Image (spheres, rainbow, N blue to C red):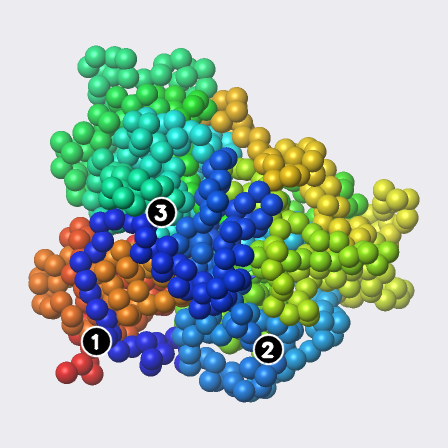
């Protein structure tokens, strides 16, 4: 069974543990990246490729969503960006012979690392019901099969369309149009498991679900709080920006249960100084907070600021509060009532230390709070982030230089995908614009997010699952439930670059549609036969959109881009220009009988802008033209989504299009009362039952989400294995274990009826590590099996991957 750890990975006696590193990056990092790149790509291709990352005429690094600096280094890449590129630009191939050689059962027995190591997918493949092996299939046949299946649904809500955040704006926009044209908003995405809590909290409080700072603000700030984020591993280019801020006199405070290397000291491989003089000390303060204690920390800061204001004044920005906010008095009252002992209990930080953080904020002229998964993957994440906003509003730290909120996104285009419509709860204004542009009526009912999609799969309500990138089976919580749910689906379809677990844990029938990645050259032939090289666009974590163009020969001539795959599906499902495709309706059948969408009160015939009359409620566009010229897709985006005026010109020659951001640009807030909102959020924090630990599931230095590059976690001193659990030495002792013991992790979750459900992950080696008492850490995705499907954040529905109650159990078979 796929949920069992593959045998090759389980001998954790092989793991070596050394002292964690205090310095991030530097020469060893560059050497390690080059070694991986050379293994995967060879020396010449490595040099060619790495020099093009994030250059103005090059491709956007698929690694993370941290923005590029305006002045780019010759090699604007980091160790982990280089690994992400090497993973994609590898010379290894997974073609029909590979699938003939390896049965599904055999592939299932391998771990994610092995699957990913096999190379790039090169041919469309089909797994027929009951078959033991995938076999090759032509593009025409495979796309016809998908289109038939989609048109044959009784109800479009029986299909689920997942997106992972590497998909370009162009592909994502077309994809959401396909989905809405079918008649559903079932568009779950990786964001649901990632920054959804940020989007929820920021939209409610400041009226936009995005951050409000630019890279210049980071450089110019006075105080940076980096909470719940490990940039040394996950956003290494951010360290250069932190270094610059630091050199200009900023104070940096790291808030984390773990002393992460990159936050403590940084050697910049791109400056001689960085390497020669032992690096810059980045964080001035390290708050070793308990898991889930951040809401309390920000309440403590707010309380401290309000007390200081009462004592001597001069702390709050009264003008800003009066002109731009609402709800201040209620917030002030709530902080007045907050109790220091509670705030201390929740954070594990003494009152005087909490007040010192408060003082740093009080005396700061401009403050930015950056965060990532440590703040978004808890039950009370939305409340926590509302309290972050409260603190910033007190001093007017939104919409001025060097100040603001900075959720640091993960996938390189996850923010762009949401901007162009990958969302299960689309806004009415967006849908109305879509309706006008494509002469149809998009469905209004909300669709499934990731967790709801899994529930529907579990309950047998999903007939077709499409994954636009990503690795749904491994990335989602409650692996056993997801695997069983997948098996309930009639057809699973994955548009992918690399082999992963979702290709081997499938629906009754399964398809693999191989596609181009960021680094691949994308040439499309137009109607006139001329072949043009295409570019795509992506949006970084700070709302800056720029173009990306791959330059490498694709892994096979037989690959279609994501855009081409979706455009062809649109044509097959909706017909050329939206008027052919399906057989003409015979008398007496409704569009639903024919498996065609029927939603809302749609007129049976509606004119389209070209004057042609169309019988059905489907979007109308020249799909073939869109496939052969992506600029035409951008023209549609420009007409549907505000802020993309002159899209084409503004991304030309490596230029950047900065999307409008009301709070940042003009202190305008698109909330119901037009003001930024102070909110009152009752304090929450996890209470750990006796004899149990609270487990966070996190990334090692050698992985990109479910893609495992290797089995080391260099900065944390773990080598040669991933099944380790990091525990405070006193807890190891108190629980009756010893360092090096092998244990099972058993999660405990009180289900709906109150009965405690248990989930088990086998064979982890216990490692003593600096983490607060009661807290533990282990790697994702091996531990996803422990995260209960119903354990999600309030409001945002994000799985609580940083907050899983576990007990350690000695392995029964251990000697
Ligand atoms: N190389 C590489 N780069 C990546 C990725 C990758 O896998 N590899 N993934 C990409 C993606 S999709 C994302 S979303 C980002 C993820 O970037 P991160 O959020 O940095 O990723 P995690 O490894 O989940 O790390 C969570 C951090 O928060 C801390 N933390 C956990 N719980 C708490 C808490 O309750 N409070 C506080 N204050 N801290 C806490 C952890 O100790 C850890 O340092 O990185 C992106 N970039
Ligand atoms: N327990 C736990 N679970 C988590 C998290 C956690 O911290 N803890 N983090 C969550 C987070 S933040 C995220 S973002 C999700 C990530 O969830 P996903 O985005 O679903 O997972 P990835 O591992 O990033 O997906 C990798 C796969 O994407 C495909 N791929 C790569 N590049 C491309 C491309 O350009 N096009 C296409 N079509 N396919 C491509 C490859 O086939 C590769 O195998 O996981 C979440 N799950
Ligand atoms: Mo993410």
Q: 142 or 234: which is nearer to us?
A: 234
- Say if 305 sits above or below 456 in the image: above
| Label of residue 605 in the image | none
Residue assigned mark 1: 13
Q: Position of residue 276 (x, y in %)?
A: 27, 44
- Visible residue check, residue 761: yes
Distance from label 1 to label 2 (Cα)? 35 Å
- Visible residue check, residue 335: no
Q: Is residue 43 left or right of residue 715?
A: right
- x 72%, y 75%: residue: 138
10 Å crowding of disc 1: few (<14), some (14-19), many (20+): few
Q: Earlier in the sequence, mark 1 or mark 2?
A: 1
The quarter of the picture where residue 465 lies is: bottom right
Q: Position of residue 675 (x, y in %)?
A: 48, 23
Q: 156 or 696: which is nearer to us?
A: 696
Q: Position of residue 814 (x, y in %)?
A: 18, 81
Which quadrant: the N terminus?
bottom left
Q: Is residue 541 left or right of residue 755?
A: right
- x 87%, y 52%: residue: 614
Identify the secondary structure beneath mark 1: helix
Residue assigned mark 3: 269
| Label of residue 95 in the image | 2
**Mark nearer the viewer, 2 or 3:** 3
Q: Earlier in the sequence, mark 2 or mark 3?
A: 2
Q: 160 or 566: which is nearer to us?
A: 566
Q: Is residue 114 left or right of residue 587?
A: left
Q: Position of residue 769 (x, y in %)?
A: 18, 57
Identify the secondary structure beneath mark 2: loop
**Mark nearer the viewer, 1 or 2:** 2
Q: Earlier in the sequence, mark 1 or mark 3?
A: 1
Which quadrant: the C terminus?
bottom left
- x 60%, y 60%: residue: 552
């Amino acid at each position: 069974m796929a949920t069992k750890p593959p045998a090759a990975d389980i001998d954790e006696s092989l793991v070596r543990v050394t002292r964690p590193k205090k310095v991030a990056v530097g020469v060893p990092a560059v050497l390690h990246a080059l070694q991986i790149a050379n293994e995967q790509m060879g020396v010449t291709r490595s040099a060619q490729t790495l020099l093009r990352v994030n250059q103005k005429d090059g491709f956007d690094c698929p690694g993370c969503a941290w923005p590029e600096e305006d002045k780019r280094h010759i090699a604007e890449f980091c160790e982990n960006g280089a690994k992400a590129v090497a993973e994609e630009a590898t010379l290894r191939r997974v073609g029909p012979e590979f699938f003939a050689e390896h049965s599904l059962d055999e592939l299932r027995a391998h771990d994610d690392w092995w699957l990913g190591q096999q190379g790039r997918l090169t041919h469309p493949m089909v797994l027929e019901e009951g078959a033991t092996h995938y076999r090759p299939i032509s593009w025409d046949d495979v796309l016809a099969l998908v289109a038939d299946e989609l048109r044959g649904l009784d109800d479009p809500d029986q299909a689920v369309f997942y997106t992972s955040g590497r998909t370009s704006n162009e592909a994502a926009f077309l994809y959401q149009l396909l989905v809405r044209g079918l008649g559903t908003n079932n568009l779950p995405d990786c964001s649901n498991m990632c920054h959804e809590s940020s989007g929820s909290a920021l939209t409610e409080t400041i009226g936009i679900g995005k951050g409000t700072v630019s890279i210049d603000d980071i450089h110019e700030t006075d105080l940076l709080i980096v909470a719940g984020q490990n940039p040394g591993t996950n956003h290494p280019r951010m360290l250069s920006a932190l270094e610059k801020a630091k050199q200009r006199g900023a104070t940096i405070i790291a808030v984390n249960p773990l002393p992460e290397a990159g936050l403590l000291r940084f050697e910049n491989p791109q400056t001689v100084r960085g390497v020669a003089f032992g690096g810059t000390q980045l964080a001035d303060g390290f708050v070793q907070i308990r898991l889930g204690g951040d809401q309390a920390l920000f309440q403590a800061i707010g309380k401290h600021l309000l007390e200081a204001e009462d004592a001597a004044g001069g702390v709050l920005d009264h003008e800003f509060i009066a002109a731009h906010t609402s709800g201040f008095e209620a917030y002030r009252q709530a902080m007045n009532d907050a109790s220091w002992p509670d705030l201390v209990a929740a954070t594990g930080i003494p009152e005087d230390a909490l007040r010192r953080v408060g003082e740093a904020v009080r005396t700061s002229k401009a403050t930015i709070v950056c965060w990532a998964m440590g703040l978004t993957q808890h039950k009370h994440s939305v409340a926590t982030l509302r309290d972050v906003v409260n603190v910033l509003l007190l001093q007017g730290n939104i919409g001025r230089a060097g100040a603001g909120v900075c959720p640091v996104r993960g996938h390189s285009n996850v923010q762009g995908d949401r901007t162009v419509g990958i969302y299960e709860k689309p806004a009415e204004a967006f849908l109305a614009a879509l309706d006008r542009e494509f002469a149809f009526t998009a469905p209004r009912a909300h669709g499934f997010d990731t967790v709801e999609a899994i529930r529907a799969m579990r309950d047998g309500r999903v007939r077709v699952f499409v994954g636009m990138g990503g690795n749904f089976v491994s990335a989602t919580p409650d692996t056993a439930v997801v695997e069983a749910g997948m098996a309930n689906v009639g057809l699973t379809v994955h548009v992918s670059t690399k082999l992963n677990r979702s290709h081997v844990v499938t629906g009754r029938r399964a398809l693999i549609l191989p596609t181009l990645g960021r680094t691949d050259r994308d040439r499309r032939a137009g109607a006139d036969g001329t072949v043009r090289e295409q570019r795509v666009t992506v949006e970084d974590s700070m709302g800056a959109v720029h173009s990306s163009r791959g330059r490498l020969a694709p892994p096979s001539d037989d690959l279609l881009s994501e855009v081409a795959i979706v455009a062809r599906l649109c044509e097959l499902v909706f017909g050329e220009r939206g008027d052919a495709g399906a057989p003409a309706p015979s008398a007496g059948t409704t569009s639903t009988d024919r498996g065609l969408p029927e939603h809302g009160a749609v007129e049976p015939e509606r004119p389209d802008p070209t004057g042609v009359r169309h019988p059905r409620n489907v979007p109308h566009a020249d799909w073939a033209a869109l496939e052969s010229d992506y600029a035409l897709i951008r023209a549609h985006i420009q007409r549907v989504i505000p802020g993309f005026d002159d899209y084409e010109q503004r991304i030309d020659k490596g230029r950047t299009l900065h999307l409008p951001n009301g709070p940042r640009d003009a202190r305008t807030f698109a909330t119901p009362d037009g003001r930024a909102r102070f909110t009152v959020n009752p304090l929450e924090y996890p209470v750990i039952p006796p004899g149990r630990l609270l487990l966070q599931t996190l990334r090692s230095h050698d992985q990109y989400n479910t893609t495992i590059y290797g089995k080391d976690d260099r900065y944390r001193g773990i080598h040669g294995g991933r099944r380790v659990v990091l525990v405070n030495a006193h807890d190891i002792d108190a629980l009756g274990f010893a360092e090096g013991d092998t244990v099972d992790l058993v999660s405990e979750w009180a289900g709906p009826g109150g009965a405690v459900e248990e989930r088990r992950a086998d064979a982890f080696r216990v490692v003593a590590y600096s983490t607060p008492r009661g807290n533990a850490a282990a790697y994702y995705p091996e531990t996803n099996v422990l995260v209960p499907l119903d354990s999600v954040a309030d409001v945002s529905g994000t799985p609580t991957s940083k907050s899983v109650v576990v007990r350690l159990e000695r392995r029964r078979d251990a000697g």
